[in-house]
């Protein structure tokens, strides 16, 4: 457990008026007779007619559009097999057999999610679901367009993304477990949607660029649980990919941008003015969200018995923002600017050479901490490597977007014979998550700046023993404290510190504790009985800024004494009469009685990660 964990543990994370040329031609040939509007209040536009589930019959044939290679949508054939009613809450599913474009060989392919389907020139819905497992027969579940249209009304009613996005604590806890080397037991519950009878959303292909495979591998089980199939890849250099989005074209939402990229791709179902509907099933079913929306280029289809994939590369230009993520798909707004959090990471090696890693990530409560870990771990691994002795010293700041709040200050040291970047990245990830999931006020992160020194040696030391020049003292006396440190693969060294007994210390017993940061945090929790819980956002910021650093030796003097923790603040050495007044008639949890008081605490840097603890009992004599 890091010192951050020890101290924080009690405080408890899409649009134009016309369709593509091919679709327009079909619409002109068939006309708009019998158009089936979504509702009186929310038609998808004046150009595109729709057809409802009640008009579809088995054997009807239509067409769909998707991209097989490049950026131009191509046509495939759809035959209605039937309608499954109420497969999902208030949602039917059109079951259709697909053919053409080689789908007979590949089956329903990852990345086809959102591919628009038309009957008699009218839009029926989006290819979105697979039926069965390990089957290459191209049978798909099609989400009715009327269901997708509900997102338009949801967008009109929405508030800001930060205020309404769903915080999925299960997702964050699973990520933390995986990153800590453990197997989470809640992966099966993380998928945003699961249908019955082997009906599941088509997996969303995820392309990760500029990343080390070991960093991706750590989180692969989480991505798979969410219905994402990650693959290492890069960004598209094609100029066509940044052209206006069109129905049947590839689209992606890019959650990380910069020196590391993370994009999830699918297909555009419909474009109306500046509104884009896509996917046909949820990405994360996060409600009101704020993700970048970019174009995408399809490189090729890969056939597989398990799940055929469409290898896709995201465009470089942000075209808009995804603003709705619901059971029936995603909705984006062209021209909208998503809120992104810039992260700047400067890593220096043993020779003093500095490498910089800059990226932007989405400002999302549930996903951002995990993406922050990915970006940081990726940059650190580039310098420190995956295995071998290493020590990482971190300093930096997290700037918050709320006026009046202090900046989060970061300073700590991590050392390990392998993968020291993991606990360091986990600490920053946890701080970020605590800020977003705080119960006091909505707060966002404006930007993060970190400077890290990476040494290819294990700089650790254990506190072997301690002694003082005397154990009987008077108030005001200065005593000599010797601390013996056994450094890794080095001879034992002794550090000397002077300690002055406070002038107002009464006679009696004193406990001298010499310990590492984690031990001191646990000691504080025990003394305060878990009472130092923040009562407002500023206290939370203060608590984070007070985290002890692992390269310090901490010296603490404490004595038995009556005191209290009131409103989240310690009030030691209270007179008995004042203490009783505070404790009388108070709401439970407002005031906590303290039985031990810290009268002195000092820190001494030793430029190594310190572990261990030792205690000595002192006695204060009368003057």
Image (cartoon, helix red, strand yellow):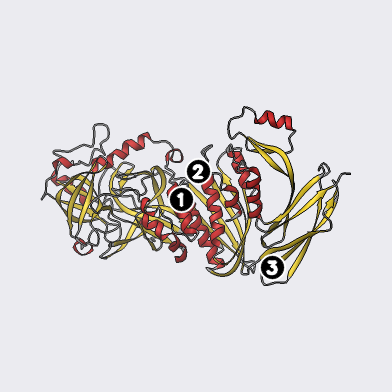
Neighbourhood count class around disc 3 (C-alpha, 10 Å): few under 14, some 14–19, many 20 upward: some
As helix, strand or loop, the secondary structure at mark 2 comes to: loop
**Distance Cα–Cα, label 2 vs label 3:** 39 Å
Q: Please name the residue shown 73% across and 69% down the image.
A: 492
Secondary structure under tag 3 reads: strand
Q: Is residue 496 left or right of residue 374?
A: right
* Residue 590 higher or lower than 453, as above or below: above
Badge nearest the viewer, 1 or 3: 3
- Label for residue 437? 2
CB under 8 Å between discs 1 and 2: yes
Q: Indicate which disc residue 206 carries.
A: none
Front residue of 120 and 404: 404
Q: Is residue 314 visible?
A: no
Residue at position x 50%, y 59% in the image: 180
Is disc 1 in contact with disc 3, using a CB cutoff of under 8 Å? Answer: no
Whether label 2 touches label 3, CB < 8 Å: no
Mark in the foreground, 2 or 3:
3
Q: Position of residue 575 (x, y in %)?
A: 75, 33
């Amino acid at each position: 457990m890091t010192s951050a964990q020890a101290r924080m543990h009690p405080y408890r994370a899409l649009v134009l008026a016309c369709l593509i040329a091919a679709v327009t031609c079909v619409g002109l040939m068939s006309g708009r007779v019998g158009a089936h509007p979504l509702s009186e209040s929310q038609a998808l536009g004046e150009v595109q007619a729709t057809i409802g589930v009640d008009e579809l019959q088995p054997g009807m044939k239509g067409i769909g559009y998707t991209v097989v290679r490049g950026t131009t949508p191509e046509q495939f054939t759809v035959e209605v097999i039937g309608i499954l009613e109420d497969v999902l809450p208030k949602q039917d599913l059109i079951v259709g057999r697909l053919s053409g474009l080689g789908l007979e060989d590949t089956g329903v392919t990852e990345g086809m999610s959102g591919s628009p389907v038309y009957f008699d020139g009218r839009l029926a819905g989006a290819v979105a679901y697979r039926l069965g497992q390990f089957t290459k027969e191209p049978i798909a579940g099609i989400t009715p367009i009327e269901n997708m249209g509900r997102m338009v009304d949801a967008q009109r009613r929405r508030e800001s993304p930060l205020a309404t996005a769903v915080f999925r604590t299960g997702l964050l806890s699973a990520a933390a477990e995986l990153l800590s080397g453990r197997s989470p037991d809640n992966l099966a519950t993380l998928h945003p949607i699961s249908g019955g009878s082997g009906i599941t959303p088509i997996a969303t292909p995820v392309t990760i660029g500029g990343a080390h495979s070991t960093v991706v591998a750590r989180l692969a089980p989480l991505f798979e649980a969410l219905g994402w199939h990650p693959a290492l890849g890069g960004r598209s250099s094609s100029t066509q990919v940044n052209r206006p989005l069109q129905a049947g074209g590839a689209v992606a939402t890019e959650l990380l941008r910069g020196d590391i990229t993370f994009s999830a791709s699918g297909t555009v179902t419909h474009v109306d003015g500046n509104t884009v509907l896509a996917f046909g099933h949820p990405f994360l079913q996060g409600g009101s969200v704020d993700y970048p929306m970019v174009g995408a280029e399809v490189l090729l289809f890969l056939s597989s018995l398990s799940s055929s994939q469409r290898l896709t590369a995201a465009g470089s230009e942000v075209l808009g923002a995804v603003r709705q993520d619901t059971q029936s798909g995603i909705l984006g707004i062209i021209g909208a600017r998503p809120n992104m959090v810039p992260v700047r990471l400067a890593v220096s090696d043993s020779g003093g050479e500095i490498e910089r890693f800059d990226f932007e990530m989405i400002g999302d409560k549930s996903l951002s901490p995990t993406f922050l870990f990915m970006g940081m771990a990726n940059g650190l691994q580039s310098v420190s490597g995956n295995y071998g002795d290493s020590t990482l010293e971190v300093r930096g700041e997290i700037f918050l977007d709320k006026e009046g709040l202090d900046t989060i200050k970061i300073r700590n040291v991590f050392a390990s014979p392998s993968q020291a970047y993991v606990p360091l990245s986990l600490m920053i990830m946890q701080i970020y998550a605590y800020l977003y999931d705080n119960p006091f006020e909505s707060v966002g992160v404006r930007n993060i700046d970190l400077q890290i020194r990476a040494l290819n040696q294990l700089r650790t030391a254990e506190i072997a023993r301690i002694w003082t020049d005397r154990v009987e003292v008077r108030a005001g006396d200065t005593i000599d404290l010797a601390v013996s440190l056994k450094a890794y693969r080095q001879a034992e060294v002794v550090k000397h510190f002077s300690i002055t007994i406070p002038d107002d210390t009464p006679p009696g017993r004193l406990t001298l504790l010499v310990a590492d940061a984690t031990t001191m945090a646990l000691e504080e929790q025990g003394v305060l009985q878990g009472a130092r819980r923040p009562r407002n956002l500023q206290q939370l910021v203060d608590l984070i800024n007070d985290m002890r650093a692992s390269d310090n030796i901490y010296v603490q003097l404490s004595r038995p004494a009556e005191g209290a923790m009131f409103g989240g603040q310690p009030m030691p050495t209270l007179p008995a009469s004042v203490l009783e007044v505070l404790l009388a008639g108070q709401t439970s949890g407002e005031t906590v009685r303290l039985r031990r008081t810290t009268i002195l605490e000092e820190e001494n840097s030793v430029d190594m990660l310190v572990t261990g603890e030792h205690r000595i009992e002192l006695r204060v004599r009368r003057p």
